[in-house]
Amino acid sequence: MTDRLILVLDEGTTSTRAMLFAPNGDVEGVSQHALTQHYPADGLVEHDAGEIWDKTLSAAQELVERVGGPHRIAAIGITNQRETVVAWDRHTGQPLAPAIVWQDRRTAPLCDALRAAGHEDMIRQKTGLLLDPYFSASKMRWLLDNQPAVRLAAGEGRLAFGTIESWLVWNLTGGTHHITDASNASRTMLLALDGTDWDPELLALFGVPRAALPRIVDCCGPLAETDFEVFGASIPITGMAGDQQAATIGQGCLLPGQTKATYGTGAFVLTCMGETLPRSTNRLLGTVLCQHHGKRTYALEGSVFVAGSLIKWLRDGLGLLVTAEESEDLARSVPDSGGVVLVPALTGLGAPHWRPQARAALMGMSLATTRAHVARAALEAMACQTADLATAFSADGAAWTGLRVDGGMVANGWMAQDLADVLALEVIRPEMIETTALGAAILAATGAGRCTTLEEAYAAMSGPARGFLPTMDASTRTLRLARWAEALAKV
């Protein structure tokens, strides 16, 4: 059936959803459920892996039923929050501990100890990653050291470790497939960028048992099939990628130099490097963008830990906003931030600074400061953080000639324009800003044989876009970035 749909499971940090894509890229249905984030202590962020699976399954089954049954679904694509670690029992399929989320900073002391022992250069050379709690390996080590059930399962050969896509595939296939795609594997700190399997030296360094880890597969192709009981028929799983790699594909950034930025819970910038192994001297990350037929495409990446979560905190934590959307109206209601600068290091600073112990600061307030100034300062911080990344990318020989943006935050037109102004670049925003899910659909369509290349699938499934051109004068831009640099230095 040429009209059959692609079902995408898009498992994010604050919500999980299912989306249906037609062959031309039109969205035919969405079902979304919020996820509970748990904060046991400062710097600790956890998820209930059981809740992730239950809500993902509920969303998917709802859409399959809505369109008339599994015969309407051609294939499944999966995209996920990266680096988050789940430990489960191979025999029972039950989680053995809370999932440790990518934002979690509990392993900073372990990373500091490994750095002091002189391991950082080896890790960076092999993996393209910096030694930071952000990545999965130290989370796995912490679970083995601090969760007796995980340690016991490892000793008895029952332990399964995986990032979120592995957990979802395990459940979708009734426990018959324990796999991860190359893009997600490259974020664990256990895979060399040019390696085809888990690296023995890195496994030994972190003390992670090879037997607990999934098999590494391509990002598209015949990867697995769902268990009959899940949807009432088996459906092929033909696409998988970490959320930021999927968004890069969904933006069509498939040639060297093409760059996208996603503004979701965090902000993530990726520049396609083609077949060139990415090597940074400015604290950016090398990562696998995609693997197809065993051939890899790489990317250079800069990761900012706090973006949309800052607006959520202003709304839910401080009560300064009624809705997230209100931030745009407040920003437009004042001519500038009134000298207020907000450095959003709520969970440390990511690229290019990498200071996990840093904490947020709100500076420059006076009796004239209103919540509108604070809201504007929060949005201005997005452009300033991105400008820091632009400088680092340029220094690494990957200067941006434009920027394609997506994610929930860039529905805010004021913020998209501010990005263009501060970066002095054209910013292009697609009409369908949820390109992470679109990228997973493109992978799944290619993996299912509908298209022979990702470029062909992107051409068939992408839609119109809007450009934002810079209007800010150079002196205003310089002053704004100088004020940001001064505030950043204080944290």
Image (cartoon, rainbow, N blue to C red):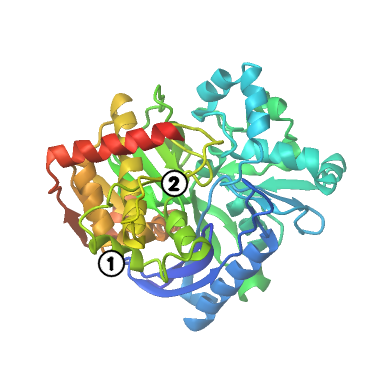
> Disc 1 designates what residue?
329
- Left or right, 342 with reference to 458: right
Element at badge 2?
A: loop
The number of numbered discs placed on residues in the rendered structure image is 2
Asked whether residue 280 appears in the rendered view, the answer is yes
From the top left corner, tell me how far across and down residue 36 is, in percent. 61, 64
Residue drawn at x 50%, y 42% as measured from the top left: 183
- Left or right, 111 with reference to 204: left
Q: CA distance from mark 2 to mark 1?
A: 20 Å
> Disc 2 designates what residue?
344
- Left or right, 198 with reference to 248: right
**Chain-order first, disc 2 or disc 1:** 1
In the displayed structure, 404 sits above or below 110; it is below
From the top left corner, tell me how far across and down residue 46 is, in percent. 65, 53
In the displayed structure, 111 sits above or below 221; it is above
From the viewer's side, name the closer residue of 68 and 293: 68
In the displayed structure, 138 sits above or below 227; it is above
Which residue lies most toward the front here? 367
Residue drawn at x 36%, y 56% as measured from the top left: 374
In the displayed structure, 357 sits above or below 7; it is above
Pick the quarter of the image with the N terminus.
bottom left
From the viewer's side, name the closer residue of 451 and 138: 138
Characterize the local packing of mark 2: few (<14), some (14-19) or many (20 or more) Cα atoms within 10 angstroms. many
Q: Identify residue type, mark 1.
A: Asp
From the top left corner, tell me how far across and down residue 301 is, in percent. 41, 37
